[in-house]
Every structure is written in structure tokens, then in C-alpha cells.
Image: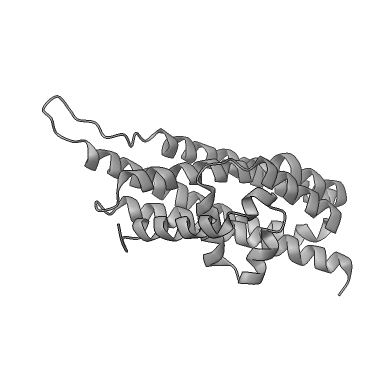
């Protein structure tokens, strides 16, 4: 296997895992929002994680990855521009999801608005989930082959920049979702560029993710 092929394989693996975490996380939020037994704090945490990480993901694609691909393969520009337009549409769905008020409030009669906010959350979560699934179904047949135009050094630098700029919002959930979507070897490879301080607390992050995901799935409290 050539060095270029190895680079392509790593790029494709990491992209596939990132996309699978988005599918898993958005689907889980829809399910969890529909269960009244799931506490508000884990719901809000998952919602905030999804909004921050999806925005970051497509912003880094638009700003950093697409130019690398287009520079090596100019004929991809039109397709990548179309994907960026879909990113803009996803932003609208994320804005709606982020705007749902999950703080516990009461109306003048003392009635909790919990059921109203959960209903609004679930509706907004469904819109994001469906938008993500439709977008990825369009993006992956374009992006995965296009990643073969990226060199090993370019991908490594891109991955480092992405990790360095990742929002510090419920990062332990990303570890949990990666563990569920990838093989141990794939996950270890993807986390290789994590800062040493983060690597040192990976066991604790995994433990926290396991506990929080169990609550979100209704498997415990």
C-alpha cells in the first residue's frame, strides 16, 4: 500500500466516524426528548453538544478542507459549493434547536411548562436529525472519494487544527459516541492528536460518557 493510500484511508476513517457520531447523537436527542423521564440537564447537555459540534464540523469543512480539495482537484468545486449551501440550511435548523428554552419555568397559574419545552425540543431535534441524515447521504458519495486528493501531511494538519479549535462543550460525549461507532483501533488512531492533558483523562471522560448516555437512553438515573 502506498503512502497516499494510507493517508486516504485515515482521512476516510476519521470522516466516517465523525459522520456516524452526528447520526447517533442527533437520533439520540430525538429519542431522549420524547421521554419525560430523562432529566433536563442531560438533554440540554446533549443539545448543546450537537449544536456546537455540528457547526464546528461544517465550518472547518467550508473554511479549511474544501480549499485543500479544490486546489488539488478543481473539478470538485461545484459539488463542494453545493454542500456548503446545505451547511447553511443546517445552520437554520441548528438555530431553532439552540433557541429552545430548557430552563424550568412556570406560568402565572403555577403550571410547569416542561411538556411544552420538551415538545419544542423534540420537534427541533427531528428537523436537525433529518437534515443531517439527508445532508450526509448527499455529502459522503462526493467527499469520501475526494479525500483521496489530500496528502498525508495535509490531512494530519487539518485534523490537528480541527481538534485545537473544537468547542469545549460536553467533549466527553464525543468520546462516548466514537467508542460506539468505531473499532478500538480506529478510535485510538483518531484520538492520537489529542492534547496530552486530554489523553491523560480519557478513562474519566469515557466513564462520564457511559453514565450520561445511559441516562439519556433511559437505562438509569
Residue 91 as seen in the image, left or right of residue 200: left
Q: Position of residue 157 (x, y in %)?
A: 80, 49
Q: In which quadrant is the N terminus drawn?
A: bottom right
The furthest residue to the bottom: 1
Residue 140 as seen in the image, left or right of residue 54: right
Q: Nearer the viewer, residue 100 or 217?
A: 217
On the question of residue 61 being in view, the answer is: no
Q: Position of residue 129 (x, y in %)?
A: 46, 52
Q: Residue at x 70, y 41 (%)?
A: 62
Residue 117 as seen in the image, left or right of residue 163: left
Q: Residue at x 46, y 47 (%)?
A: 128
Q: Residue at x 71, y 49 (%)?
A: 79
Residue 12 as seen in the image, left or right of residue 53: right
Q: Residue at x 55, y 65 (%)?
A: 179
Q: Nearer the viewer, residue 84 or 68?
A: 68
On the question of residue 103 being in view, the answer is: yes
Amino acid at each position: 500500500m502506498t503512502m497516499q493510500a494510507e493517508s486516504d484511508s485515515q482521512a476516510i476513517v476519521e470522516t466516517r466516524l465523525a459522520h456516524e457520531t452526528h447520526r447517533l447523537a442527533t437520533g439520540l436527542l430525538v429519542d431522549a426528548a420524547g421521554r419525560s423521564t430523562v432529566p433536563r440537564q442531560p438533554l440540554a447537555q446533549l443539545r448543546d453538544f450537537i449544536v456546537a459540534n455540528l457547526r464546528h464540523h461544517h465550518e472547518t469543512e467550508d473554511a479549511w478542507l474544501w480549499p485543500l480539495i479544490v486546489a488539488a482537484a478543481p473539478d470538485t468545486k461545484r459539488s463542494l459549493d453545493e454542500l456548503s449551501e446545505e451547511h447553511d440550511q443546517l445552520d437554520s435548523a441548528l438555530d431553532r434547536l439552540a433557541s429552545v428554552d430548557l430552563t424550568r419555568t412556570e406560568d402565572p397559574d403555577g403550571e410547569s411548562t416542561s411538556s411544552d419545552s420538551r415538545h419544542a425540543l423534540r420537534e427541533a431535534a427531528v428537523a436537525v436529525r433529518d437534515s443531517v441524515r439527508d445532508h450526509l447521504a448527499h455529502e459522503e458519495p462526493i467527499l469520501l472519494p475526494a479525500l483521496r486528493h489530500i496528502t498525508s501531511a495535509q490531512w494530519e494538519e487539518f485534523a490537528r487544527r480541527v481538534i485545537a479549535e473544537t468547542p469545549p462543550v460536553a467533549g466527553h460525549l464525543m468520546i462516548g459516541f466514537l467508542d460506539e461507532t468505531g473499532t478500538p483501533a480506529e478510535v485510538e488512531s483518531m484520538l492520537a492528536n489529542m492534547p496530552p492533558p486530554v489523553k491523560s483523562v480519557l478513562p474519566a471522560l469515557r466513564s462520564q460518557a457511559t453514565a450520561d448516555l445511559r441516562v439519556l437512553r433511559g437505562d438509569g438515573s
